[in-house]
Amino acid sequence: ISITDTGIGMRQEEKRRAFDPFYSSRGPEREGLGLTLSQWIVRRHGGEIFIESERDRGTTVMLKLPVSKEEGFEDR
C-alpha cells in the first residue's frame, strides 16, 4: 500500500525523525503520534513502513504487510 502527496516533501532530518513520538516539523501546536502509531501497528502485524520524500516533489509512505495464513480469512 502506498500513499503519496505532492506537497513540499521532507528534508533529510524530518524524514529521519518522522516516526519519533511527538515529533512535528509544523510547530508545537501540531505535535502528534500519527506516524509513530502507524509504525507500531504495522510492525505488530509483521509488516514494514517506509518513507520516500524529495523536497518540492512530495512524499510517499509505503506499507508492506504479510498475507494472512489464517484459514477462512477470505470469507470475512
Image (spheres, rainbow, N blue to C red):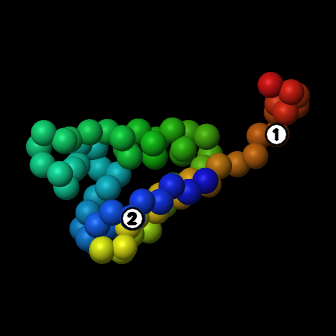
Of callouts 1 and 2, the N-terminal one: 2
Q: Nearer the viewer, residue 9 or 69?
A: 9
What is the quadrant of the C terminus in the image?
A: top right
**Looking at the image, do the residues carrying marks 1 and 2 touch, with CB atoms under 8 Å apart?**
no
Residue at 31% across / 39% down in the picture? 33
User: Could you say where residue 15 lies in the image, as x and y percent from the top left?
Assistant: 32, 64
Whole-percent x and y of residue 61? 47, 58
Q: Position of residue 48 (x, y in %)?
A: 56, 54
CA neighbours of label 2 inside 10 A, class few (<14), some (14 to 19), many (20+): few
40 over 50 or under it: above or below? above
Question: Residue 18: x and y, percent?
Answer: 32, 55
For label 2, the residue is 6
Foreground: 54 or 45? 54
For residue 69, the mark is: 1
Residue nearest the observer in this picture, 45 or 59: 59
Indicate the amino acid at tag 1: Lys
Give the left or right position of residue 20, taking residue 1 as reference.
left
**Label 1: element kind:** loop
Query: Which dot, 1 or 2, sits closer to the camera?
Result: 2
In the image, residue 15 sits, relative to residue 31, either above or below, namely below
The residue drawn where x is 29% and y is 50% is 20
Instruction: Kindly tell me whether residue 51 is visible in this rendering.
Output: no
Per the rendering, the mark at residue 40 is none
Q: Quarter-wise, where is residue 69 in the image?
A: top right
